Amino acid sequence: MVHRLLREQIIPRPAAELWEFFATPRNLDALTPPDVSFQIIGEIPSRMYAGQLIEYRIGVLPGVRMRWLTEITHVRDFEYFVDEQRIGPYRLWHHEHRFTPSADGRSVTMTDAVSYEVGWGPLGELMHALWIRRQLATIFDYRAKRVQELFAGRAPL
């Protein structure tokens, strides 16, 4: 079964400033909770591009780390990008990051739309109901808090 997670956050910053941060793959580390044990493997270019592969190690359970390989499949500068899992804990992972500027250009609505499928049949659905859904919500709650700390506290340009 395909599940969806949708989050929106209004950030009082211009789109170009947010894009510079989110288009830099290394910054993902600053948005990931420490207990996920997130680690980017290898060197990656400083700017994201369509076709880019990024490899991580993540903690999926206490003491259990897993390889996660994602591909940046679509990029439209200052508007959106999509990452899709190629190897990792999900049967399907499609994550669209969208940046929609306000009419006056002084703020941006950032939207995360994730479609994912756990796999493993009924066992996977049980794990989703008992743990995975809550874990993803916690990760995206942390991310929203960090974005707020990093961007909302500064005066608009």
Image: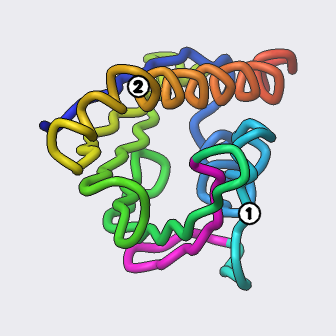
The numbered dot on residue 39 is 1
Above or below, 79 against 89 in this view is above
**Residue 85 sits in quarter:** bottom left
Is residue 50 shown in magenta? yes
The numbered dot on residue 110 is none
Apparent side of residue 149 relative to residue 15 in the rendered image (left or right): right
Identify which residue is drawn at 64% across, 65% down: 57
Closer-to-camera residue (47/139): 139
Quadrant where the N terminus is found in the figure: top left
Task: State whether residue 154 appears in this view.
Answer: yes
Identify which residue is drawn at 70% across, 77% down: 41
Disc nearer the start of the sequence (2/1)? 1
Is residue 64 shown in magenta? no
The percent position of residue 6, horizontal first and vertical second, equals 35, 23
Q: Please provide the residue range marked out in magenta.
A: 47-60
Closer-to-camera residue (50/93): 93
Give the residue at mark 2.
Answer: 133
The percent position of residue 150, horizontal first and vertical second, equals 82, 29
The percent position of residue 97, horizontal first and vertical second, equals 43, 42
